[in-house]
């Protein structure tokens, strides 16, 4: 049995508005616009060993800042993430989502990795898989996209703190 409390599923993108009610608790799914991700094949045997190398894997990719890192196995490769906690919390706060209202935080990469079709996140953008990585694209570049529906979403085990 899973005794963890759950929040209301909520997808958040930097450019979209969210309607939140007072006292709601959320399980957030962050858009790719909040983080950097790499699908890497590296001769390392464990995720804990890989975590030591994550800052150097992203040093030429991310702008200056203080980043947190996360990684997990993906078949014979790894998915590695870099994200700026403070920047994310600042943006969420501007959208009316304070940290005490957040139950768990997930990357959309982890939550939508098995989608076979693009997912429309608003009237201008979609999420689609390109070379094992979920990317945000303009809607004009994708011929078909299903609307995002989180009503029956089952979350992965890849939450970040």
Image (cartoon, rainbow, N blue to C red):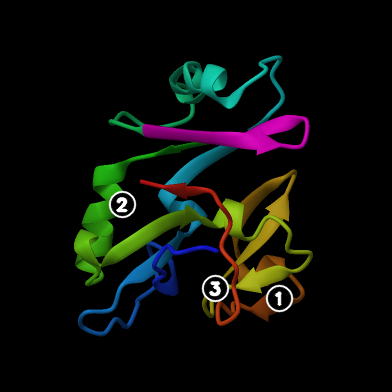
Q: Please tell me whether the stretch drawn in magenta is mainly helix, strand or loop.
A: strand
The answer to whether the residue labelled 2 contacts the one labelled 1, judged by CB atoms less than 8 Å apart, is: no
> Which residue is labeled 1 in the image?
145
Disc on the earlier residue, 2 or 3: 2
Disc on the earlier residue, 2 or 1: 2
Q: Nearer the viewer, residue 124 or 72?
A: 72
Alpha carbons under labels 3 and 1: distance apart: 9 Å
Provide residue 106's location: percent of width, then percent of height.
47, 55
Disc on the earlier residue, 3 or 1: 3
Alpha carbons under labels 2 and 3: distance apart: 18 Å
The answer to whether the residue labelled 2 contacts the one labelled 3, judged by CB atoms less than 8 Å apart, is: no
Q: Secondary structure at mark 3?
A: loop
The answer to whether the residue labelled 3 contacts the one labelled 1, judged by CB atoms less than 8 Å apart, is: no
Check disc 3: other Cα within 10 Å, few if <14, some if 14-19, many if 20+: many
> Which residue is located at x 69 percent, y 19 percent?
42
Alpha carbons under labels 2 and 1: distance apart: 27 Å
Q: Where is 79 relative to 17, above or below?
A: above
Provide residue 97's location: percent of width, then percent of height.
25, 68
> Which residue is located at x 78 percent, y 30 percent?
76
> Which residue is labeled 3 in the image?
121
State which region is magenta. 68-80
Q: Which mark is residue 88?
A: 2
* Occupied quadrant, residue 21: bottom left
Q: Is residue 120 left or right of residue 117?
A: left
Check disc 2: other Cα within 10 Å, few if <14, some if 14-19, many if 20+: some
Q: Residue furthest front?
A: 1
* Occupied quadrant, residue 115: bottom right
Q: Nearer the viewer, mark 2 or mark 1?
A: 2
């Amino acid at each position: 049995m899973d005794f963890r409390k759950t929040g209301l599923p909520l997808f958040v993108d930097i450019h979209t508005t969210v309607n939140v009610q007072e006292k709601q608790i959320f399980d957030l799914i962050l858009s790719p616009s909040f983080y950097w991700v790499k699908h890497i094949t590296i001769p390392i045997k464990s995720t804990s060993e890989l975590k030591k190398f994550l800052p150097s894997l992203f040093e030429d990719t991310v702008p200056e800042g203080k980043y947190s890192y996360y990684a997990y196995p993906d078949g014979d490769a790894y998915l590695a993430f870099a994200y700026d906690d403070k920047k994310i919390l600042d943006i969420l706060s501007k959208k009316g989502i304070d940290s005490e209202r957040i139950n768990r935080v997930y990357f959309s990469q982890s939550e939508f990795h098995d989608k076979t079709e693009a997912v429309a996140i608003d009237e201008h953008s979609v999420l689609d898989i390109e070379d094992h990585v979920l990317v945000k694209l303009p809607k004009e570049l994708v011929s078909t996209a299903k609307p995002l529906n989180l009503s029956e979403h089952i979350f992965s085990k890849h939450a970040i703190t």
